[in-house]
Image (cartoon, rainbow, N blue to C red):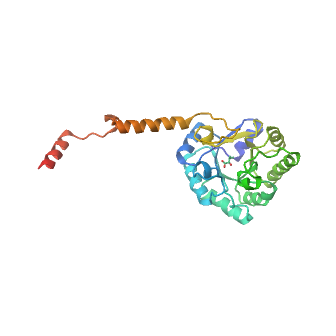
Amino acid sequence: MKNTVSTLLKQKQSGDRITMLTAYDYTTAKIIDECGVNSILIGDSLGMVMLGYENTLPVTMEDMIHHTAAVARGAQNAFIVADMPFMSYQVSVQDAVINAGRLIKEGNANAVKLEGGAEVCEQIKAIVKASIPVVAHLGLTPQSVNAFGGFKVQGKSLENARRLIADAVKIQEAGACMVVLEGIPAKLADIITSKLTIPTIGIGAGKGCDGQVLVYQDMLGLTSGHIAKFVKQFANVGDVMRQGITDYINETKAGTFPAPEHTYAIDDEVIAQLIKEENE
Ligand code: KIV
């Protein structure tokens, strides 16, 4: 069954936790979708995990459309959310609507996600008015990495926590259908979740949120280097890949791959004739 804005809302209302994972390509999206995840996010985290940038800031609309369309071709049932990249919605409301529209028309997304609170409410209202569902994103919003001075947990001070609660209410009033809460204390996420009627999706925000999201490379053990505290590694696919690739190299060098079962047959008579012709 296709997940939609209304099925996700019903999940919040009935206490059925929402599952969301990132994906950036057809093959991975197909596997994730077949497992029954409720929603797939084509995050601008693709800048880091797919394109090797230091942060999400260089990601373009073209990058997002390209990867969103691939994911949409692979996913039948998951609710597809595409991130609006840095500077695709901040400058003007008109930009925001045009770019959100491109992610729906060209990327085949079901919704768009953008970062920020009160400062992006006009954009949220205008995009929603164009019949495009909007997922908001509060807390440790990676596009603000330079303003924050690094990837730092948000909402720890009273003032900051109050602002996040107020922002959550404002984005809901502006028409957002869901909100991602990233890198905030679990108890603050609980307060926001109980105050809102729309689902909250946590990443580094504790188990009290209405759902969870993780970057799939992180939870499958494909990323190396620093791993955030909130990531649980559910499998070590990186080691499985390393082993498979090493076996391939060794067997190819040893001449044991390809084996007879990996090759195509031809009639002996045809070969005999070819050899005869070669020797003439
Ligand atoms: O870009 C992304 O993957 C995200 C998630 C971390 C929520 O925004």
Residue 258 spot, x, y in % from top left? 34, 38
Pick whichever, 116 or 211, lies toward us: 116
Q: Quadrant of the N terminus?
A: top right
Quadrant assignment, res 90 = bottom right
Q: Residue at x 79, y 60 (%)?
A: 122
Q: Is residue 149 left or right of residue 159?
A: left
Is any atom of residue 67 visible in this view? yes
Q: Is residue 212 left or right of residue 74?
A: right
Residue closest to the eye, 127 or 14 = 127
Q: Residue furthest left?
A: 280
Image-based side of 61 in relation to 278, left or right: right
Q: Is residue 28 above or below residue 64?
A: above
Residue sitting at x 72%, y 53%: 145
- How far across and down, in percent of the image, does residue 232 sit? 66, 35
* Residue 208 occupies quadrant: top right
- Image-quadrant location for residue 183: top right
Measured from the top left, where is residue 82 in percent x and y?
65, 52
**In the rendering, at what x and y percent does residue 234 appear?**
62, 33
Nearer to us in this view, 231 or 124? 231
Can residue 257 be seen by looking at this rendering?
Answer: no
Number of labels in the image equals 0
